[in-house]
Amino acid sequence: MGGLVSALAFPVPDRHRSEPLLKYQGNRLVWLTTRSTSTGKKSSISSSSATGTSTGLRIPALHIQRPKSTFTLLYSHGNAEDLGILLPYLDEMSMELNVDIFAYEYPGYSIADGQEPSEQLCYDAIDAAYDYLSRNINPYSIVLVGRSLGSGPTVHLASRTPHIAGTILQSPLESGIRCVLGTCSSIALYPLDIFCNYAKVSKIQGPVLIFHGLADRVVPCRNGKALYALLQQRTNHVPYDPVWIPGRGHNDI
């Protein structure tokens, strides 16, 4: 069952579709190394400089910068997409919002090292991305943004990191099992569950915004509403009203 949960959580797109990332030059494409001791196997299409080591895996990140921007979005993508697929979307979002975007890759996706993704490798990846950003910019200008499965590493980091500007969750899941089977099943199958956002979200200290499509059939909106209910129980609650979007699903917000 644990393997089935992971298989459903990580439908990795064709990794060769992200080969154009290797053409990026300068500081737009950044290579990070995770602190995980599980190196896995290198991607066959990784850059020659992006080799796995005994201390971690090499993963790419896109750093899109805008003149006079105030915030940097640390972006965690969903499960059936990768940086190669998201290039036009990230550029458009950066332009429309006039923000910098730092979007990192999960091990096992696109041109990152690692053969198979996992919950822990996603956590390792966002830690590496945040460590890089916080060394180079003011942490209080960083906004964590997690879409769908990306809400898992985002909540994990936000619950442990008070010195950020805020957190945005798009179509977030309560947990891997709660998303598919509901609360009762997650209690019975707790040892097998992954990305247990419901157990961490109330530990986030800063402002949190949740938005979710009411017609979402991939991650039903009850997930976002349950997380918002937990946020309201915080003693340091910052009143950002959630946005429940009528007629919108998982991929058309």
Image (cartoon, rainbow, N blue to C red):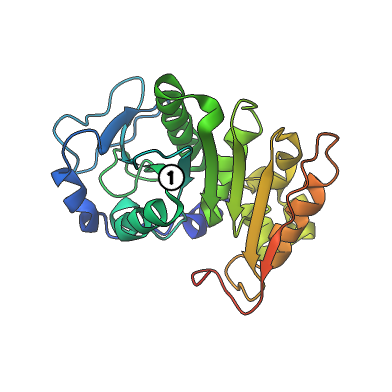
Between residue 115 and residue 249, name the one nearer to us. 249
Where does the image place residue 48, in percent across and percent down from the top left? 13, 33
Q: Is residue 38 left or right of residue 226?
A: left
Q: Is residue 218 left or right of residue 33?
A: right
Identified at 39% across, 38% down, the residue is: 68
- Image vertical order of residue 66 relative to residue 210, above or below: above
**Residue that lies at the very extreme toward the bottom in this rendered image:** 247
Question: In the image, is 84 to the left or to the right of 237?
Answer: left
Quadrant housing residue 36: top left
Residue 37 seen in the figure? no
Residue 181 at x, y = what percent? 69, 64
| Image quadrant in which the N terminus is located | bottom right
Residue under label 1? 99
Taking the spot 18% from the left edge, 51% from the top edge, the residue there is 19
Q: Position of residue 38 (x, y in %)?
A: 40, 29
Q: What residue is shown at x 69% (from left), y 40% (from top)?
A: 207
> From the viewer's perspective, is 155 left or right of 10?
right
Name the one closer to the observer, 215 or 143: 143
The amino acid at mark 1 is Val
Which percent across, then down, holds residue 76? 47, 46
- Quarter of the image for residue 220 reads bottom right
Q: Is residue 95 above or below residue 164?
A: below
Q: How many marks?
A: 1
Crowd class of label 1 (few under 14; some 14 to 19; many from 20; radius 10 Å): some
Q: Is residue 110 above or below residue 56?
A: below
Helix, strand, or loop for circle 1? loop
**Res 49 quadrant in image:** top left
**Residue 32 shows up from this direction:** yes
Tell me what residue is drawn at x 41 percent, y 45 percent: 117
